[in-house]
Image (spheres, rainbow, N blue to C red):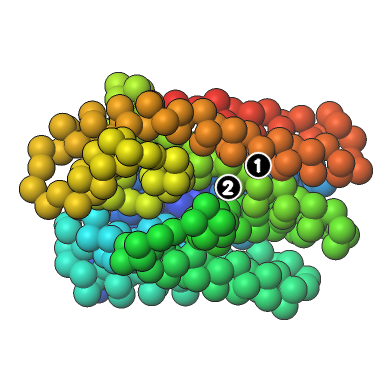
Amino acid sequence: MKAYIELIEEELESYNFGSHPHELYEPINYILSLDGKRLRPVLTLMTYRIFNDNYKKAIYPALGVEVFHNFTLLHDDIMDNAPIRRGSPTVHEKWNENIAILSGDVMLIRAYELFIKSGFGDLERLLIKFNKCASEVCEGQQYDMNFESTLLVTETDYLEMIKLKTAVLIGFAAELGAILGGADEKTSDQFYEFGVNIGIAFQLKDDLLDVFADTNKFGKQTGGDIISNKKTYLLIKALENAKNKTKEELDQWLKKKDFDPMEKVDAMTGIYKELGIKKLTESKMNSYFTKGLAIFDSIDIEESKKLPLKELSLKLMDREK
């Protein structure tokens, strides 16, 4: 992991995204310098290395995935009116919304530039798959925004939303490494499905951590989703399972406009514990994780070559932040 991340950081730092006007390009360098996990480009490089030891050959398309991911975060933060990203002010807070929109647009353009610089022979195939993924990410974000004003969001609705908003890009990152490495259609599809299922589990883990993480290890205050009434898997299951007085208390907290944030977090967390929501969420998370690993294990490639990627997957589910 360390070697992959060091390469990614080095290349991001040295890549010339542009310089003038500086108001346009400084935000790009800023958001890319924040402390991200680099999960998606690492997935691309690790998958590529299964087919070709010289993983550095896949660095440009791997960076393309990371730049696109950060572009979506930059625009999502505007739509969510989020003040903080990875412990630092969001771009629209540090500069303004217009700059954040325009810088994000340039990031999307640079993502395509990085894919083109890959030198991959069948660029049309690569870009068609990327365009499908990028459109689905936008669809997922729209569903997420729709949920803010939707009274009833079902478990099925939510799982489809996080599949589109989060998981398909993780799936594409894994698929991309396989495609660049010369895998056939069946094998690259298997890597995609593996990534999508791991990606859904990854988001469910995030939902859990926002409520139940150790704040000291999580790196930020827990309970943000509770404070904003965000329709996560935990809240959806709580609404589905709460009865009588518990339901009344849950409804009251969701309707309150004026409240002490920590009091609400404590109360809602207590309701989740009473209803066994943590266990329900872990069960759903583990079902997707198990499905993803089963797909991965079925890929007809030497096990020793797949082992590093499998170990990364296990770490993702065991993380505390």
- The residue where tag 2 is placed is 200
Mark 2 Cα-neighbour bin, 10 Å: few <14, some 14–19, many ≥20: many
Q: Identify which residue is drawn at 62% across, 72% down.
A: 132
Q: Identify which residue is drawn at 89% across, 35% down.
A: 302
Q: Earlier in the sequence, mark 2 or mark 1?
A: 2
| Circle 1: residue type | Tyr
Whether 216 is drawn above or below 44: the answer is: above
Whether 3 is drawn above or below 42: the answer is: above
Q: Does residue 246 appear left or right of residue 52 in this picture? A: left
Return the residue nearer the eye: 56 or 51.
51
Residue 151 bears which disc, if any? none
Q: Quadrant of residue 321 in the image?
A: top left
Please say whether residue 193 is visible from this viewpoint: yes
Q: Are marks 2 and 1 in contact (CB under 8 Å)?
A: yes
**Is the N terminus in the top left, top right, bottom left or bottom right quadrant?**
top right
- The residue where tag 1 is placed is 288
Query: Secondary structure under badge 1?
Result: helix
At which x and y percent is residue 227? 23, 44
Query: Secondary structure under badge 2?
Result: helix
Return the residue nearer the eye: 46 or 200.
200
At which x and y percent is residue 86? 31, 43
At which x and y percent is residue 272? 37, 32
Alpha carbon of mark 2 to alpha carbon of mark 1: how far?
Answer: 7 Å
